[in-house]
């Protein structure tokens, strides 16, 4: 298998962390999807990373689809319950964290447009989603050691990737001061080798 990726993408990082936790080996192929020379559309018609290319040439895209598949490959590092409410809870956390990222990425892209073309109404709408998501994360975490309780899971991976990326791209957002319990969780996740090995580069790509 090979993973078509960008080191700056939090969605890619989620997949890479799952691979480390589950000890799955995979070739990493870096791709700049914004380049006019990018060939990503030949593999993923949505033009996005991550994209997992299988040994038979088939491809999986969307990070949630990829990590769901990876979780089935080996019992090592079980990150997602097989069924029931426990599985739904983890997936809801994943949806929340990915939704935060979707909104934050939309803000960043809007701010890259010429200033006179930017929609402040649109930006403010996305910021409301970001702040509401962080508040919901804090409430859901409560005093538990991990998002869903005592066990580290895909929920923690997605939350960690989302908040790390938010800190990298929008350092002025003071979520750590406002939500210290979340800050404790993120610091704890940062000590895991999987998070260290996939830390996003300090770049603007």
Image (tube, rainbow, N blue to C red):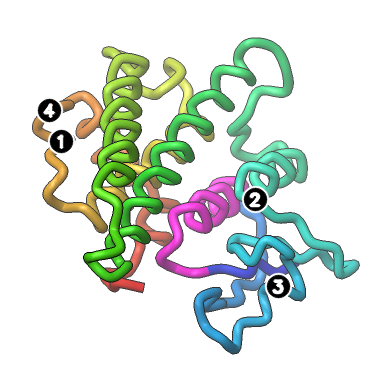
Q: Is residue 154 above or below residue 149?
A: below
Alpha carbon separation for disc pair 2 and 1: 29 Å
The residue to which callout 3 is attached is: 41
Alpha carbon separation for disc pair 2 and 3: 14 Å
List the single residue furthest toward the right: 56
Alpha carbon separation for disc pair 4 and 3: 41 Å
At x 63%, y 10%, the residue is: 85
At x 32%, y 67%, the residue is: 113
Which comes before the other along the chain, label 2 or label 3?
3
- Badge nearest the viewer, 3 or 1: 3
Q: Quick check: marks 4 and 3 in contact, CB under 8 Å?
A: no
* Span colored in magenta: 6-22
Q: Quick check: marks 2 and 3 in contact, CB under 8 Å?
A: no
The residue to which callout 2 is attached is: 62
List the single residue furthest toward the bottom: 37
SS at mark 4?
A: helix
Place of residue 170 in the rendered image (x, y in percent of width and height, measured from the top left): 21, 53
Mark 1 packing: few (<14 Cα in 10 Å), some, or many (20+)? some
The residue to which callout 4 is attached is: 178
Which comes before the other along the chain, label 2 or label 1?
2
Alpha carbon separation for disc pair 3 and 1: 38 Å
**Left or right, 118 with reference to 50:** left
**Left or right, 12 with reference to 54:** left
């Amino acid at each position: 298998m090979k993973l078509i990726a960008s080191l700056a993408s939090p969605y890619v990082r989620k997949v890479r962390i799952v691979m480390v936790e589950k000890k799955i080996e995979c070739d990493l192929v870096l791709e700049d999807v914004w380049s006019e020379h990018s060939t990503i559309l030949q593999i993923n018609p949505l033009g996005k990373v991550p994209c997992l290319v299988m040994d038979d040439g088939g491809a999986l895209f969307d990070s949630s689809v990829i990590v769901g598949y990876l979780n089935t490959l080996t019992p090592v590092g079980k990150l997602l319950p097989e069924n029931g409410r426990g599985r739904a809870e983890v997936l809801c956390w994943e949806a929340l964290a990915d939704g935060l990222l979707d909104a934050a990425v939309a803000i960043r892209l809007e701010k890259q447009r010429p200033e006179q073309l930017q929609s402040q109404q649109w930006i403010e709408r996305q910021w409301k989603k970001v702040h509401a998501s962080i508040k919901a994360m804090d409430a859901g975490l409560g005093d538990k050691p991990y998002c869903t309780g005592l066990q580290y899971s895909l929920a923690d991976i997605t939350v960690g990737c989302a908040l790390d990326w938010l800190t990298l791209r929008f350092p002025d957002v003071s979520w750590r001061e406002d939500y210290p319990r979340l800050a404790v969780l993120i610091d704890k996740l940062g000590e895991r080798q999987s998070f260290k090995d996939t830390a996003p580069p300090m770049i603007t790509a």
